[in-house]
Image (spheres, coloured by chain):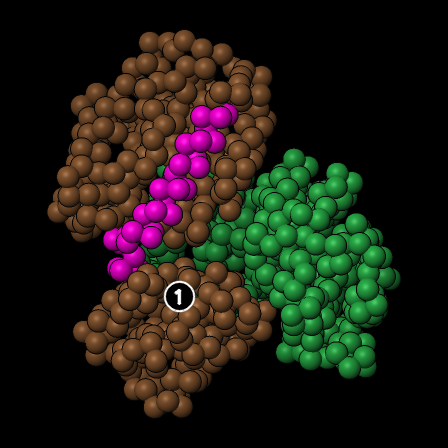
Chain colours: A brown, B green
Amino acid sequence: MSDPHERRRAALRTALRDRGLDALLIGDLRNLRYLTGFTGSNGALLVHADGDDRTVFCTDGRYKEQAAKQVRGLEHLIERASALALAARAATAGLRAIGFESQHVTVDGLDTLTAAAAGVDLVRAAHLVETLRLVKDDTEVEALRQACAIADSALAELIADGGLRPGRTERDVALDLDRRMLAHGAVAPAFDTIVATGPNSAIPHHQPTDAVLRTGDFVKLDFGAQLHGYHSDMTRTLALGDPADWQQEIYDLVAAAQSAGTTALTPGTEVRAVDAAARQVIEDAGRGEQFVHGLGHGVGLQIHEAPSLAKTGEGRLSAGMAVTVEPGVYVSGLGGVRIEDTLVVRDAQPELLTQTTKQLMVV
Amino acid sequence: MSDPHERRRAALRTALRDRGLDALLIGDLRNLRYLTGFTGSNGALLVHADGDDRTVFCTDGRYKEQAAKQVRGLEHLIERASALALAARAATAGLRAIGFESQHVTVDGLDTLTAAAAGVDLVRAAHLVETLRLVKDDTEVEALRQACAIADSALAELIADGGLRPGRTERDVALDLDRRMLAHGAVAPAFDTIVATGPNSAIPHHQPTDAVLRTGDFVKLDFGAQLHGYHSDMTRTLALGDPADWQQEIYDLVAAAQSAGTTALTPGTEVRAVDAAARQVIEDAGRGEQFVHGLGHGVGLQIHEAPSLAKTGEGRLSAGMAVTVEPGVYVSGLGGVRIEDTLVVRDAQPELLTQTTKQLMVV
């Protein structure tokens, strides 16, 4: 069973049998991709607890040929309303208890599923696939590794080519960084690239404007590459010209917090304890109020996924989880610093995927 | 009331009063952007039937400053779980009947809303904002116009620079086209650019591969630009070298069908009649089986939105609707043609936004 999708479906079947479900209806496209490799924009999957020979994949006519190449070893059905077609199939096949993704299916959607699957018991079965996705397999880590390497290369090149020279606008820099990621093989940016300079760097999620990079300011870059469906996520904050004392002070503080968070990334640790480890460093410096968000998040087929490394996060880390560690200190009206890596939790120390230096870079 | 967001909220209030709702809870980010201009990735809105002075916007701390600039004239609340915070607010404010977007709220999400809004009657109110969004206002049409102009410019430049020369891969061409759209001001491509050459052009939604452009083949480009949240959508199919008879034949057929569909775009026409007008041309030529998808779709804040110009589409066209007209003929194993425009329905003839020629271009 060398195909990762086949392995993932086998793991899911175990979860289905544990819950007494005959099958699970998957409509979420990321879960569908995870379980089959299908990359189209419409489709669904009915995973049968008994095995792949009773599991049915469905998409519409536009993707028939693509699906024939991407989705192997499963029966294919071609219907525009794919989830409904599979619900109807479950009914005609005499299945009794079908799980559905209650965290994805809408209130109206459940009505139409219920009508299509007459006689079938539709059972809430939230997060079964997401739970499998928490721990990344080798194929996934390799995609993340490559996506992170693309972002590293794009930033190194941007800096080397003078792309952060004073006078450029935030928007120019964002566009430049995006182009370089595409040139290095990214399918797309992982999310809307953030470039924030001067006082804008104090806005955690700033959207690039025509504000101009000026000597004496910070410039904060939060960006990532998308590859094979996986997302990288990295933030670096650079000084435009020699840093003032206040800049060096908050940079060093955030770097120390980031290091403390990374050190806390060990299997078995509660996710909220990782947040607390980094947050404590910033609170001890009297700047707790200026760290206005959680420490990090899982990353994979979604840019934000479980686990949440935050005060309100629940659960513990496991080896193989991919997460960001991204503390920030934001001084309103003046400027802010965030430093963010993407890492994989390992038994010994975490594997760092975003390898750009965390020393304060002066350009 | 010159602000378009304010006008849209006023129109929505009329719909709320018609349904006897005290307020509508908006969690869908596109509907939120439509009603407020907010572009962040988390937020919600409680539109009160009485007016903006009782309407509350909510986002989290990351977007506080951005929201202060983008969302004017409304009370702001800062909470991470924005929709839940507004549901709780509705309860404390003593509201009785609150509509929710049952086409967006998940089955699990409704549970948490219900718990947060104790004592409030949560009423299904699907598609209220989407119904307003069907007819585009001047601000929206202008955004679509600009997004379409970007795509036109990018394609013209690609062709002029020899970007479609034999020997390039589909992937190279897609990347090149994306970069040119970004350079012309696109925030991002509107969707994953399709470049399909040779037999791949017979796959309606092909994803670019390392397949090489060869003389004697078709190359089909389906792409668009995103600007101010709005999407353009255009397909052109070009001949690499002088077209063979079979190529010219299906090209002319698709062009005739596209023209027939466009001619049928008049206010009051049933959407399925528009599909039928174009489909009839292809069926009369005995190629009905090779036109495997609907004729077109609405386009705006989503790349695919209502109305659906398809056999199964419902309703009639109105002036101001923005739609695509995109018939195709796909000959499996050989090649295919699709020609697609984005247009706005007008009282006289439709306004063509994608202005690239529909003559068969030979490169």
**Where is residue B220 shown, x and y percent of the image?**
69, 57
Badge 1 amino acid:
Thr
How many marks on residues? 1
Indicate left or right for A308 with A93 as reference. Answer: left
Indicate left or right for B177 with A82 as reference. Answer: right
**Where is residue B353 shown, x and y percent of the image?**
77, 52
Residue that sits furthest to the right in the current view: B348
For image coordinates 61% across by 45% down, the residue present is B172
Residue A345 versus residue A288 in the image, above or below: below
Output the chain of dot 1: A
Q: Nearer the viewer, residue B168 or B306?
A: B168
Q: Nearer the viewer, residue B343 or B255?
A: B255
Does the magenta-highlighted stretch encompass residue A155? Answer: yes
Is there any visible trace of residue A201 in the rendered image?
A: yes
Residue B41 versus residue B126 in the image, above or below: above
Q: Which residues are magenta?
A: A130-158
For image coordinates 39% across by 42% down, the residue present is A146
Does the magenta-highlighted stretch encompass residue A218? Answer: no
- Residue B276, picture quadrant: bottom right
**Where is residue A45 shown, x and y percent of the image?**
40, 72
Indicate left or right for B96 with B152 as reference. Answer: left
Is there any visible trace of residue B58 in the rendered image?
A: no
**Residue labelled with disc 1:** A36
**Where is residue A133 shown, x and y percent of the image?**
29, 57
Q: Callout 1: helix, strand or loop?
A: helix
